[in-house]
Every structure is written in C-alpha cells, then in structure tokens.
Image (cartoon, grey):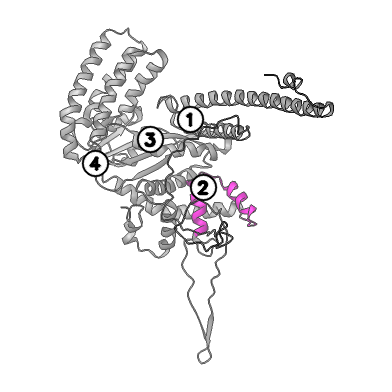
Amino acid sequence: MNPLAELDQLNLEPAAKIHVTAMIQTLVDQAAQDAQTIAKKDAKIAALTHELAYYKRIRFSHKSEALAPLQRDVFEETWNTDMSAIEAEVEQLQDNSPSDTVTRPKRPRAGRQPLPEHLPRIEHRHEPESCTCGQCGKDLVKIGEDVTEQLDVEPAKFFVHRHIRPQYACRACETITAAPIPPAVIDGGMAAIGLLTWVMISKFLDHLPLYRLEQIAARNGVILSRSTLADWVGRIGVALLPLADRLTWHLLQRDSLHADETPVPQLDPGNGKTKKAYLWAYRSNDLQPGPKIIVFDYQAGRSGRHAQQFLQDWHGHLMVDDYGGYKALFATARAHPETRLLLEPCIELACWTHARRKFFDLFQASQSPVAQAALQRIGALYAIEAEGRDMSSDERQRLRAEKSQPALTELHDWLQKTRLLMAPNSATAKAIDYSLKRWPALTRYAETGDLPIDNNPVENSIRPIALGKKNWLFAGSERAGQRAAVIQTLLGTAKLNGLDPAAWLSDTLEKLPTWPNSRIDELLPFANAD
C-alpha cells in the first residue's frame, strides 16, 4: 500500500493536502530509518549470539585435561568474563530497540545462592513517601515485606590502637606503679595483630609482593616501608617455626603419605639472575583418620637426598610420581641420611593420574582407539573410587576386592596383549610401558581400603604456589624460601581443615607470646577444626 498514492484520491484542500503529504513522508522516512536501525541491531545481535555460543561451547565442552590446571583456571576466568560482557551487550542492544517491533526474550537466570548467614547485616528500610493510598486516600496497611540482599565489602581500613598505662606513685616509699606492657609477638613493634595478619595473609596466601602492600597502605595515607614490612615477615616466620616443626612431627606419625615437588626460581645475586630451587610437599592421606596436614620443605635442588633427609627413618606407603629421586627410598634397604644405619624401605604407590595422562596425551595427538579404550578402562577404576568415597575403610576394601581388583586384572591382560601388537618405541608402546613397568605400585592401593589411587591431593595443594610465583617471580634467598615454606605449611594446613587462615593466624599470634611450649599442639591449625 502506497499512502501517498491513495492521498491523491482524497478530495482535500491544496494546503491540507500538502501538509498531510509532508507528515506521511516524514513517517515513511522515519519507518525506513527504524527498519535500517533494527536490521543493523539484529545483525549485531546475531553476531554476538554466535560469539556467545562459541564461548559456551569451548567453556562447557572442553576436556578436563586439555589445559594445564593453572592455564585452565586463567582461561575459565577469561571465558566467564567475556560471556558476561557479550550478554550485557546483547541486553543493551535489545533494550535500545523500539519496543513495538522487537520482542526481547526473557533472560534465563540461575537460582542465586543465599548470602552467608554469618556475615553482619546492615538494614536499609525504604518506606513509601505517604502512608495513604494514592487512589482513594485511605490509610495503607502493611501486609508483608520484600527483602533483597546485596553483598558488599569494605577495603582494608587502617586504624590505631592506643594503649594507655596510667602511672601511680607512692609518696611514702617513692615507688611508681603501672600496668605491665601487654606481651606482643614482636616486642616494641608498632604493628598490631590485625596488621601483621593482613601482611602475612596478603603475602603468602594472596601472593602479593611487599611493594604492592606498600602501595596499598600509601593510598590510605599510611607509610609502611618495604624494609619495615620485611622485618615483620622475618620475625613472624621465626615465631611460627616451632608450629611448623610440630606439624612435621605429626605428619611423620602417619603410615602413608603423598609427596611431590615443584620448581621455584631463586635469586642468584652473584650472577645477576635466578637459579632453580624446589619446594617439596608432603601431605597426609585423606582416606585415613586424623586431621589433614600439608608440609612444605624448601630445598636448593631436586636431589633425592632431600626427600631422604625430610623423611629420616620414616617407613610406610609413599605415593609419588615416577621421578627418579624417590627410587632410593624404595630400595631393599636404605641408609639413614645422618647415622648411616640401614632402614626399612618405603613402599611405593604409583599415581593413576600420571598413567592416565600418557594415554590422554596420545589420544589428543592422534585420536588413537587404543588410547581411548585405555581411558575408558581407567575411568572405570575411578568410578569405583567415587562409589566408595563415603564408605569406611573396611567397606571400601571389600568394594575394591569385589570390583577394582578384577578390573585391574582385566586391564593388565589387555595392556599386555595390546603391547604385543605395537611397534617398538611407538608412542602407544611407550604409554603402555609406563603402566606395565609400574604395575605393582599402581595396583597396591586396591589391596587395602585406606590407600589413595593417585597423587592429586598433594598436587592440588601445590597448585596455589604455582599461581603465586607468577606474582612474586622468585624467592630472594634460600632463607626466604624456607620461611615461605613454614608459613605455607601452616596456612595450607588451616585451609585443608576448613579453618579461616586469617582468623587462625590472628588468634595464634595473639596467644603465642605467653603460650607454654607443653601445650603447643593446641595452637596447631587443626586443633579446633570440626
């Protein structure tokens, strides 16, 4: 329909006809512009929708081992941020579209988790401007409340504690009496417990270098030099060393442990560069009773003698990867690192995650059907472990005897037969050989109900260190690395036992100056854990 053509058929005055023609032409031009704008927005929305679908596909369909754990954490953060930004752009385009022509689909929203009950609440009441009805003027009656909650945070706030100690004199005997100075973990220091806790948590849990803490304080008008901060860190590290030593003693009372190590750059001032040191980690077995413990041991190298020096005369099941430095621990007899007396060998447990990774890498590289079959069979072993996760040790042992051991026997037979069909030195042969050569250590867990199937617990405990060293870049010295290991041991153990590391550290630093050594176990970061 052409409105201008139909206008000619109407019997209108010339002036009115000109006026109406101009109005119709304006409306037609505006409609054309609106159509063009809508078309552009529709094209933009379609492009953003396609991009969002792509991000969702790579976000939710990527394989668990396609990226290293640290890479996966970083990329997932980026994906989630990009997806939210795209959704916001689409909403803006839809909100700015003419309401009469564009139907905006309702955005699906997942149910929001309730905010933690332990947080303090600040109430803001929003009352109507008038207590009478805007329609009829009668009084309003309260029938209920609509309550919404928003989470807020207050950045680090500096304040000063003033300790006032009145002094009283005795005129008769000319003596002066005053209350004693409250004991402090750093005698004569200006830092209160809260500030010391903030510095230690920021540096060792949030991995912020001291120069960044210096900048944060400066923004609040507080001058905290790096030398002062470093002095506090050094003194707190020494004060907490007995607690870390006691944790090590408790750990070595267990009869099965996890062990792993990760490289840490250490400054080498003489050469003007860094050298490679190692942070060794030893963790308790979650399948056995008792509090969870993680102990870090900083050493200048990766030699197996460092593990021997830490374990001393310890004997039990040790879950490790295939690093050769541990092999001396599993010999028929080993010498004590100090006394040279012969000790019983440790019993090796091998990690099924490492064995699986060989086949996973092979499958990713070549889509090998052999690797795929191996992954399915190993997955069945983990399904059995998931089934027995909440069982007692005896129940889990029966489950493993009933299901895991037959599955392992079948897997071993399959690996041996498949290996005969593979060319020597092929990638498939190497992946199979990795498991066959470690078979006794890989299957030992299934003979019990309280030994782990893999080394994931200790690797998960090390992961924050791998993230943190991207911030602090290197350890300044061997002593600095050892001090970091002490603090990481205590804070890491607190996290494993469900404690708030900051609350535990603050309470411990307050009690430590007057706490008797005979009761040191009461200060350990699991004493009050549920």
How many angstroms separate mark 2 from mark 1 (CA)? 22 Å
Query: How far separated are the C-alphas under marks 3 and 2?
Result: 21 Å
Give the foreground label among 4 and 3.
3
Q: Where is residue 222 drawn, in percent x and y? A: 63, 57
Mark number displayed over residue 255: 4
Alpha carbon separation for disc pair 1 and 4: 34 Å
Q: CA distance from mark 4 to mark 3?
A: 19 Å
* Whether residue 31 is situated above or below residue 424 in the rendered picture: below
CA distance separating discs 2 and 4: 33 Å
276 over 529 or under it: above or below = above
Residue 237, percent from left and from top: 46, 52
Instruction: Tell me which segment is drawn in magenta.
Output: 194-223
Q: Nearer the viewer, mark 2 or mark 4?
A: 2
Return the residue at label 1. 71
Counting other residues with Cα less than 10 Å from the Cα at mark 4, is it few (<14), some (14-19), or many (20 or more)? Answer: some
In the rendered structure, which disc, 1 or 4, sits on the residue that comes first in sequence?
A: 1
Residue named by callout 3: 459
